[in-house]
Amino acid sequence: MPDVPQCISFDVGGTLIEPWPSVGAVYADAARCLGIQADGAELNQRFAASWIDARKKPGGFDYSRSAWKELVRSTFGEALPPALLEGVFESIWHRFERPDVWKVHSDVLPTLELLRTRCIRLTVLSNWDERLRPLLYRLGLADFFEDIVVSGEVGRHKPDPALFEYAVHRWAVDASSILHVGDSEREDLQGPIAVGWRSVLIDRTGSKRTNSIVQLDDLIRWIG
Ligand SMILES: [Mg+2]
């Protein structure tokens, strides 16, 4: 059984919260308000493909407004006339600031409550943009965390070691006493290990990978 960590660092998207009811549904609703009919399920598939492509590009996805706008453009493709891109993008950008388009996983609050009683420092380390901190407040999650590090504000994104090193310095804690939990193998499992942190992958699909948990409350048993 590993030592109990001094600090647990959480990824956000896919770990604590998910778009609700789906990215595609939110995109379709924003488009409908501007007179464009689009199918949410189809947009969801197109978004997934565009998201993979965007992250493969040299330099990766930088979580800037322009990067998100390009993702909106490529997700809609020809269904969105160029003259309407700005309006649809602005609508989508602001929709994802709202708590009603996100679902907090049911195991999140009980787990954070329990960890708080164990006096473990809780932090966030997320690839996101300036909308994250206000969103976590609106979702009632921000007060659990002593610090929220947002990659877009630092200008470095997981798995860039510079972001993890920035967080270690900011939190004034030994790298080896931090446990990071997240849903991306590259960003949340391998990235932290490369800089001497411990990490655990949350795999809510339950495909039972080594070193993974299926729900967040499994973290309690995992840390001992
Ligand atoms: Mg994630």
Image: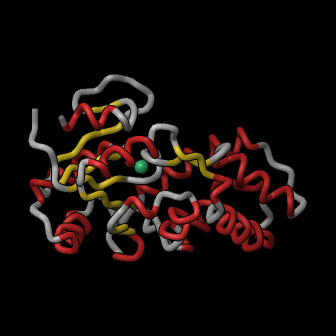
Percent of width and height locating residue 119: 23, 54
Percent of width and height locating residue 150: 39, 68
Q: Is residue 165 above or below residue 6?
A: below
Q: Is residue 54 left or right of residue 74?
A: left
Q: Nearer the viewer, residue 15 or 136?
A: 136
Q: Is residue 155 left or right of residue 94?
A: left
Q: Quadrant of residue 176?
A: bottom left
Percent of width and height locating residue 167: 24, 68
x 25%, y 50%: residue? 180
Q: Residue furthest right?
A: 35
Q: Quadrant of residue 34?
A: bottom right
Q: Is residue 14 above or below residue 164?
A: above
Quarter of the rendering occupied by the C terminus: top left
x 64%, y 46%: residue? 20
x 80%, y 64%: residue? 81
Percent of width and height locating residue 194: 14, 53
Q: Quadrant of residue 165?
A: bottom left
Q: Nearer the viewer, residue 51 or 193?
A: 193
x 51%, y 62%: residue? 136
Quarter of the rendering occupied by the N terminus: top left
Q: Is residue 30 left or right of residue 221?
A: right
